[in-house]
Amino acid sequence: MISERAAFERALKEAALGRGDVEPNPLVGAVAVEDGRLVGVGHHADYGGAHAEVALLEALGGSLTGRTVFVTLEPCSHQGKTPPCADALVAAQPDRVVVLTEDPNPAVAGRGIARLRAAGIETVVSEDAELRQRERTLNAAYYVHRDRDRAWVIAKWAMTLDGKIASRTGDARWISSESSRREVHRLRAHVDAVMVGVGTALRDDPRLTPRDVELVRRPVRIVLDSRGRLTESARLFEDVERFPVWIATTERAPANWRRAMESRGATVIEEPARNGRVDLAAALVELRRRGCERVLLEGGAELFASGFEEELIDAVEVYVCPRLVGGREAPTPWPGSGRASMAEALTLEHLRWDHLENDQRLRAFVHSPRVGGGPFKRPAERA
Ligand code: AOF
Ligand code: ZN
C-alpha cells in the first residue's frame, strides 16, 4: 500500500523533472493510485505545454475511475495556454483528489479545488506540513515571480573555451556545434520573446525565429534600440507576420525612423532611458504587462552586462565550446568593470550540465550574494 506521503514524494520527484524548462511556471507533478498501487505519473514538462494532470491523463489513457490523484499544486481553473486541469479531471472522474498546496495565482486561488468539489469529486488538501514546505522550496522561484512585475529572463550565449562570445572582429559564426544551435531554436520556441541589443541586430543581422522545431510558443522579437539605428533592410522584418517585431526605444529616436519601422510592420515602444540606453528593468516590466512572461536574451555583451549588473537575469543557458580565439578586444559575456571580488560574484544554482556534440551546456539559475538571492528570495527578504 502506497501512503499519502510516498505518493507525494513521488509526485514531487516527477515535478522536479521540469526544472529549467517551465519557469516561471511552477514545477508540478501528479500521480494516480489504484488499490494502493501507483498506476501512473505525470509532470509539467514544458513552458506553454501540458500541465501535470493532463500529462498524467495522457499516460493513463484518459480514465481515472477507481483511482486517487495526488497532485503537488491545486489543479488550475483558468483557461491559460492550455484548458483548465480541474475540468480535465472532472471529465476523467477520479474517486478522490488530494492536493498538496493551493495555487497562489489569482486566476486560480482555490477555484480549482472548488470546481472539483462542485462536480462531486471528493477533494482534500494535504495536512502534511513538511511535504507542503518541500513544495514551497521546490517552487521558490515561482512564488517569488508571482509577486513581482517583470518577465522571467534567461540569458543564452555560446562561448569559446577562453570565454569569448565572438572574435575581436565580431565574428561569431559559428562558435557552437550544429546540435547546440538546434537546441537554441528549441529554446526560442519555448519563450514569449527573444531580445537583442541593436548592436547585435546590426552586426549579425539575425532572424531570431525558431526554425525546424515544434512551436510551443510563438515568440516576438525585440530589439533594444535607444537612438533608432535599426535599418529597414534588417532580416528581422522577413517573418514579421508570423513573429512580430517590437522595438524598445527612448525619446531620442527620431520620428521619421519610428514611422519607417512601423511601415515595415514593427511595433515601436518608448521606454525610459537609463545611462542613455533603454532601461532594461522598465522594459521587462512593460513586457510582462504585454503578456511576455519568459524572455530570452541573446546578446550582445552590452545587454548581458546590463542584465547582470542590474541583477535582472534569472537563468542562464551557456554553451562552452572547444575553441580558443583569444584577444583582449574579443567580447566576453560580461564586459565593463564587473564585480570587484569573488565574494560579490553571482553564483549559479541548480546546475544541469550536458553534452551536445563536443560542446558542454550549462543550464542554471542565477543567485546573487549582493541582494541575497536572485529568483529564490522574495524582495522583502532581501537585506
Ligand atoms: C496546474 N497544473 O501542471 C501547472 C499549473 O502558462 P499556463 O497557461 O501554462 O498557466 C500557468 C499557470 O497555471 C501557473 O501560473 C499556475 O497558476 C498554473 N500551473 N497548474 O493545474 C500544472 N503548471
Ligand atoms: Zn492546469
Image (cartoon, rainbow, N blue to C red):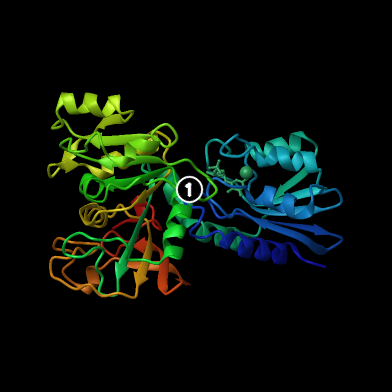
Q: Which residue has dot 1 on it?
A: 189
* Three-letter residue code for mark 1: Ala
Inspect this view and state whether residue 121 appears: no
Q: Position of residue 131 (x, y in %)?
A: 61, 62
Left or right of residue 211: residue 84 = right
Quadrant placement of the C terminus: bottom left
Dot 1 surroundings within 10 Å: few (below 14), some, or many (20 or more)? many
- Give me the residue at 58% from left, 62% from top: 17
Residue 108, compared with residue 125, is above or below; it is above
Q: In the figure, is residue 21 to the left or right of 31?
A: left
Q: Position of residue 293 (x, y in %)?
A: 43, 43
Q: Where is residue 18 in the image (x, y as percent from the top left)?
A: 55, 59
Element type where label 1 sits in the image: loop
Q: Is residue 90 left or right of residue 47?
A: right
Closer to us: 64 or 227: 227
Ligand number 2: quarter of image: top right
| Image location of residue 97, percent across then percent down | 74, 49
Q: Does residue 169 appear in the picture of this structure? A: yes
Q: Which residue is drawn at 82% across and 64% down?
A: 37
In the image, is residue 12 above or below residue 320? above
Residue 291 higher or lower than 350, as above or below: above
